[in-house]
Image: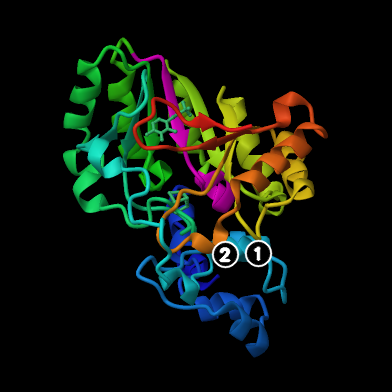
Amino acid sequence: MSTLATVPTHVNVAADWRAALRNAFKVPSELLDFLELNAEHRAALGPCENAFAQLVPRGFAGRMRKGDPGDPLLRQVLPLAREKETVPGFSADPLAEIEVSHQGIVRKYAGRALVITTAACPVHCRYCFRRHFPYADQTAVRYEWRDTVASLAEDSRIAEVILSGGDPLTLSNRRLSLLIDQLDRIEHLDTLRIHTRFPVVLPERVDAGLLELLAATRLKTVLVMHCNHAQEIDESVDGAIAKLRRVGMTVLNQSVLLGGVNDDADTLVALSRRLFAAGALPYYLHELDRVAGAAHFEVETSRALELIDSIRNQLPGYLVPRLVRETPGTLSKTVLG
Ligand SMILES: *Cc1c(COP(=O)(O)O)cnc(C)c1O
Ligand code: SF4
């Protein structure tokens, strides 16, 4: 916690989440030391430096079980040597998003436009389908929003803007309000959606400044968080979600079905129940996008269908996420089962 301790007292609260992010585990061996994993565990795991570097906030690491190399949170974030294996069918841009994106806007689905606001994330998920995305050419941030906003204003078919990335909440509140103020003035927009993993991996991000700007917009606001396992949610996450709901946000969750993390019915049932207890509804359960480096997370579609059937039999309908697959060239996500 040394970085946190050195933040001067005159720095405002908004700096805290940045300090926490700077202080995240960036080296596999340090994370493994923190988790008290011995040489035998390490040999079994095969941790490895990677161009898509490790990034794990300490608070998130604090929810992992010490001494357990199979911990479902650890598995999501620890870079492994096997990510470098080439597996047929797994490519750098499985969704062909690079083709449909222009100046940081991905316009694939009717009525909604997804804005790639930034490349940065508060955590590096090893299964991320954007791990090879050429952000330098594609993020809206380079354009200071002007071209992005102009382009959204021109297309009256767009009712909902989705801020994505990377993670849009890595932007400062000032930068976000600059964008949201401009979106507010586009008459054909009615909804602002934010796709973010912050409430789960760095709940400190849900600070007073952010809540203020979310409360101020005339747009309906939806936050889609990203959590794959009930163990990711603790009291700090409960607190962040409660604050978001208090400013009128609808809070939903998307998960990715991941081998060795959440590919059994009990785990998925527990996740849905824990989300509901925290104030978030399960929205999507994504099949893994076949991105190079993530093949070891794949779950067979037949198994995915079995799982969704099984949880449907155990949960009320509103706690059953839609199992979806993203197929390049289709007008929506494909719902399975
Ligand atoms: C998922 C996604 C959306 C949003 O789709 P919903 O079904 O409304 O959640 C929009 N644009 C892109 C490019 C997406 O991948
Ligand atoms: S937070 Fe989202 S965009 Fe960022 S690495 Fe994880 S899955 Fe990818």
Residue at the bottom extreme, as displayed? 39
Cβ of mark 2 under 8 Å from ligand 2: the answer is no
Residue range corresponding to the magenta coloring:
189-205
- Residue ID for mark 1: 62
| Crowd rating for badge 1 (residues with CA inside 10 Å; few <14, some 14–19, many 20+) | few
Whether residue 213 sits left or right of residue 250 in the image: it is left
In the structure shown, which secondary structural element does the residue marked by tag 2 occupy? helix
Q: Are marks 1 and 2 in contact (CB under 8 Å)?
A: yes
Does the rendering let one see residue 279? yes
| Crowd rating for badge 2 (residues with CA inside 10 Å; few <14, some 14–19, many 20+) | some
Q: Quadrant of residue 176?
A: top left
- The amino acid beneath tag 2 is Arg
**Does the magenta-highlighted stretch encompass residue 154?**
no
**Where, quadrant-wise, is the C terminus in this rendering?**
top right
Q: Residue at x 81, y 32 (%)?
A: 313
- Residue ID for mark 2: 58
